[in-house]
Image: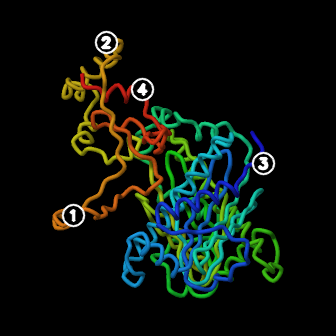
Amino acid sequence: MSDIENFDIRTHIIDAIIDVFDTRVSMEVEFSDSEPPDITSIGRMVATVNVAGNVIGMINIQVDSELSRLMMASMLEIEPEAVEDDGEIKDLLAEISNIVGGNLKSALNDAGHPCVISTPSLTYGANFTIKSLKMERFERLIFKHQEKHIFVEVGLKAQQNSGDDDELGATDTVAQLSNVDIEKVNALDINAKISEAIIDVFDTMLSMKLEPTDAVTAESLEGIRNAGSVSFAGDATGMISIHASDSFSREMAAEMLGMEVEEIEGDEEIRDMLGEMGNIVGGNLKSAFSDAGLMIALSTPSFTSGTDFTIKALNMENYERFAFRCGKNIIFVEMGVKVSELVPTSVKPDPVKAAQADQPAVQAEVNDPVETQRAKTLEDFDLDLLLDIPLEIKVELGRARIKIQKLLNLAPGSAVKLIRLEGEPVDVLVNGTMIARGEVVVQNEKYGVRVTEITSRMDRIRSFSI
């Protein structure tokens, strides 16, 4: 594995931030060496993407609420006071972090550090700090737009090569999806796995008994709260956060270390304890995914502390909050998961096919002779007869669902918001069937797609019209 210490983080991040603010937000920003003001106690947003694989780490992009509104107004060419939707502001920040993270991921892969990035998450509120744990490389870069500051933090750490991480960064990673056990993926109860893992880790690590409770109480959100988070990326992406009050966090750390609560003076022991919990719970979920044939990697844990903050992973298919009681103390766990669209089981099962699946195998063959014959034809067909036939390839940037009234009001200059974030892989389709995903590139003033994920050879054959 190559040495991460020689990787030029600073240049890649500076170039990416200046470029994305110019092209996406129509704002000029500049790198600054001046000491910025302290904004830890004012309303702000932090967009985060995590790196996982041969290299683990995170990228945080932080702006205060006023600047985030200015960014949205500049992009839409309206006055800041006309910006009303905080959801769109959060989407914009997530999009920017995704683009910057994607650029860093590509540079790391090119430098011999295979890795993937997680879906973006947002932390927002009026009083909190975020720390990433145990980084070999850490850069804190400041940018300015007029008198406003943008804070970018990047932490990276090389980890021991297990072999799987190399495959995560490879171009044909998704070709491995032919090994996915569809029945196991469909049967995987993610919510139950997380709940069982949390209860077990409190029992084995802390000798504490947890009992599920219905909801997070307002009292449990008062005062200083700590959260340990771990993200994962690959064939499935998402985040798990474990939240506890500062007083209970100290009890937990003291119990784990065999110390008295009074001996826990700072937050280092708490960070390590919550980080270890996140690793164990995330590792259990990773093992369940791996057992079903999905390939994912965990990021390094991060630690958030404060009196007013919310952590939310974006664009998740499954998002849950679990609350538990330990004596008079309440902890809660937030979990977001999204399985890659290239995994066949990420599509909801057809109820007709599901009903047929309950029938004996012989009966299924009789009921579906066309599909049986089609499969046999694909296996026996001489592909040499088709190799010279041209096929039309389409690249889909994204889709949107809008009301008819909005459709009728479209005019030159109107903006249509797509579900897919900028910087996310685009879909490559043949005959309407997705056969790959990739990154948009520009070469010799022409657009192209660099393939990053591709389906199996048989799935590509099935996209032909026979």
Give the mark nearer the N terminus: 3 vs 2. 3
Q: Quadrant of residue 391?
A: top left
Residue 80: x, y in percent? 42, 81
Tag 4: residue type? Arg
Give the mark nearer the N terminus: 4 vs 1. 1
Cα separation, mark 1 vs mark 3, equals 50 Å
Q: Label 1, on which residue?
A: 410
Q: Label 2, on which residue?
A: 385
Give the mark nearer the N terminus: 1 vs 2. 2
Mark 3 vs mark 2, foreground winner is 3
Give the mark nearer the N terminus: 1 vs 3. 3
Q: Label 4, on which residue?
A: 457
Q: Residue at coordinates 25% horizontally, 22% vertically from top-left?
A: 374
In this rendering, would 209 be left or right of 435? right
| Element under disc 2 | helix
Tag 2: residue type? Leu
Tag 3: residue type? Asn
| Element under disc 4 | helix
Cα separation, mark 4 vs mark 2, equals 17 Å
Q: Quadrant of residue 356?
A: top left
Above or below — where is 383 with respect to 24? above
Above or below — where is 219 with respect to 157? below
Cα separation, mark 1 vs mark 2, equals 46 Å
Q: Label 3, on which residue?
A: 6
Mark 4 vs mark 2, foreground winner is 2
**Image quadrant occupied by the N terminus:** top right
Residue 149: x, y in percent? 61, 76
Tag 1: residue type? Leu
